[in-house]
Image (tube, coloured by chain):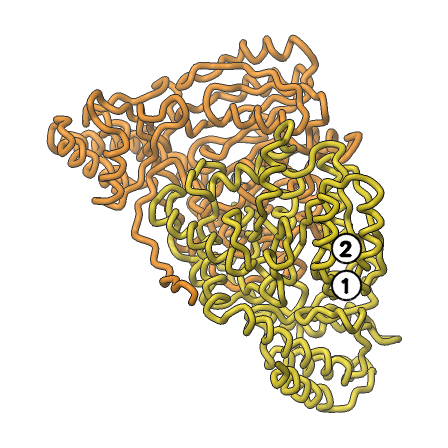
Chain colours: A yellow, B orange
Amino acid sequence: MHRHFEDLNPPRRLLFGAGPSNPEPRVLRAMAAPPLGTLDPAFTALVDEVAELCRYVFRTRSWRSFPAPGAARAGLEAVLASVVEAGDRVVVGVNGQFGALLAEIARRHGAAVATVEGEWGRVLEPDALLAALRQRPTRLVALVHADPSTGVVQPLAEIARACREHDALLLVDAALSLGGCTVDVDAWDLDACVGGLQKCLGGPAGLAPLTYGERVETVLAARRGPPRTSFLDLTQLQDQWSPERLPHHTPPAGLVYALREALRIVQTEGLERRWKRHRCVGAALAAGLEALGLRLFGDPRHRTPMLALAEVPEGVSEPRVRQRLLNDYGIEIAPGHGPLYGRVWRVGLMGYNARLESALAVLGALEAVLAAEGFGVAPHAAAQAAHAAYEDACAAV
Amino acid sequence: MHRHFEDLNPPRRLLFGAGPSNPEPRVLRAMAAPPLGTLDPAFTALVDEVAELCRYVFRTRSWRSFPAPGAARAGLEAVLASVVEAGDRVVVGVNGQFGALLAEIARRHGAAVATVEGEWGRVLEPDALLAALRQRPTRLVALVHADPSTGVVQPLAEIARACREHDALLLVDAALSLGGCTVDVDAWDLDACVGGLQKCLGGPAGLAPLTYGERVETVLAARRGPPRTSFLDLTQLQDQWSPERLPHHTPPAGLVYALREALRIVQTEGLERRWKRHRCVGAALAAGLEALGLRLFGDPRHRTPMLALAEVPEGVSEPRVRQRLLNDYGIEIAPGHGPLYGRVWRVGLMGYNARLESALAVLGALEAVLAAEGFGVAPHAAAQAAHAAYEDACAAV
């Protein structure tokens, strides 16, 4: 006898961790629309629209804008694997978990990696990267724009200029930031940028929008041999998404529908309004967390609007608070990454979740749980502080 | 002003090509259920169920059974990248497009590839592979079980025994066959096997169930260095799906739901009944195509039940027939691959589509289109032949 498997019935959750977030309901509905064949004209028309919407959200005119098949790390690996040849020098900024990941991926594809290390919670100073660029010819610099492990936003424009001067390409991991704060690929002159669908874009996990420009294209065309991957070969992926429609893999139609719907919603809202929404909600959350008596982690001048890191107070059990939030309120928040495990909670209000009521929900639940765990908090102070900060942020230009 | 993008409204299609096929409606609904966090106990419970269902469908007891994030070629690349180290000898059977792909992937990961070439439409003789195994120590043999470009099924049991004797691992691409005809991983003693979700399993594209055994595990553990990929590192994928739950990437929850639902439906139907259903419908389709006056491609002793290749008659425009089927009937069939482009149509009735009425629909539409294209066919002969063959096949043990 075989085991009986129950009907699918996932519990109701408010996904306020570092991603995945709750997708827009319209996006979930789109995902369930019936698939089309890869070369069906009705499908290729949607593919072209997705490419156009990718250009919109990255603020680029590069027609090399399309989703990589997989998580953001698949998109980053596609760029690194396809740009790097054995022995190429790659400079990676490492001041968080995801910088370390970029370094690891580059090494696996044969790069001679030089890391520029920085403190978690602080941004990398352009001077440190400049010094690394001056040492030796560098094929590519890889940086995380907003690292989900630290919650700080790395300024990029000055570094991009330095890369240009030293003839190095610049790859940016914008998995957390894309759709939630300014990402301006053409204005900043980024060579390649990879976003995440399940964070501030309000979609599900499974595809990673990316874009790259002419300088990358030139490097790809001049390779001595093929990349060390077939599935994530950027040129082949691009050929599938370009009007040539050279078949590579069967794209996940449901996810393509979801990506199109998510980006369509972003476009209808408008990027600037969406960024402001994340900023206002982030201000409310930060103010509320501080009113609860929690210290925020990271340089206050560079904190991400969509993800707050709150330090765990002395004597409070980090996992037990998370577990009570999940079990009693259906609210998921994330633990710290690596060296911050046990030391911070990470609370993300992204995409569809970036609303004042989300901040109020998690603050209210945290207030009750912290009180039950013996950490005294002033009742209602968090909600008041959140409201006030929200109004201030919304009133600001 | 930005462009306005219309509401998603994919046309109705009968996907009778080589995949994707129409998924089960219940699977599409499952895909739209709200995501859960990767470490949510409600999600990890589903992950464990998926692993159990993967074991069922592969007929294996290996707990190393889980989906790779991507198309079947992502699963195949995960195995090849993770098993192969630079210079390892890999023997690949190439008698179709997908054997050639296996060879290309292995080469990109540093293998010394020896191909055993065979004619398209015929199976590889064990002797040819045996001769290759005798030449030099071989790390791995890679074979396609049922190649979508040729529509023949490769017998595997004897080759698997030879691999054992020569201490070579055997990787099998069962993307087309899994769920549609016998795939018996433990009984055949396959070391690794990769399936496809969007063909005979009745799901959407985007995940590839795979399994591998202890001998592969031993090779992975003895590697001199990490694989040339991070996203498709089999050990890391396994660690994420195992009870350790080491985070790797954010899994696409909607696709995990869809995979679970698809496999649950397979388990409820039962593999043997499902194979028989594909066999009966395949017999009906083959008989009907022949009654239309079309010659079938490939060795009749080894044709796949789920995919028929019909030769294009003299004087008939291959693409125009496909286009008329799509435009006038909403029926998608596939063109030939590589050297067979323009020479055959590929008609697949897989998973949810493997039903007598699908065969009747495509035969009736083809009959009308071929007649309109000036290729004389006897009216109704195809439907009668299909019915008769279906009843014969169903009556057979």
Location of residue B168 with respect to A166 vertically, above or below: above
Q: Residues within 10 Å of mark 1 (few under 14, many from 20)?
A: many
Of the numbered discs in the image, which one, if any, rests on residue B226? none
Q: Look at mark 1 in the image and give the residue it sits on.
A: A150
Q: Is residue A184 left or right of residue A29?
A: right
Q: Is residue B104 left or right of residue A28?
A: right
Location of residue A252 with respect to B301 vertically, above or below: below
Asked whether the residues under the numbered discs 2 and 1 touch, taking CB atoms below 8 Å apart as contact, a structural biologist would say yes
Question: Residue A235: percent from the left, percent from the top?
Answer: 55, 38
Q: Which one is in front, A158 or B392? A: A158
Q: Looking at the image, is mark 2 or mark 1 earlier in the sequence?
A: 2
- The count of marks equals 2
Give the spatial CA distance, label 2 vs label 1: 8 Å
- Discs 2 and 1 lie in a common subunit: yes
In the rendered image, the residue lying farthest to the right is: A314
User: What secondary structure is found at the residue carrying circle 2?
Assistant: helix
Q: Residue at x 58, y 21 (%)?
A: B160
Q: From the image, which quarter does the C terminus of chain A lie in?
A: bottom right
Question: Residue B313: percent from the left, percent from the top?
Answer: 22, 22
Quarter of the view holding residue B107: top right
Q: Callout 2, which amino acid?
A: Gln
Q: Look at mark 2 in the image and give the residue it sits on.
A: A97
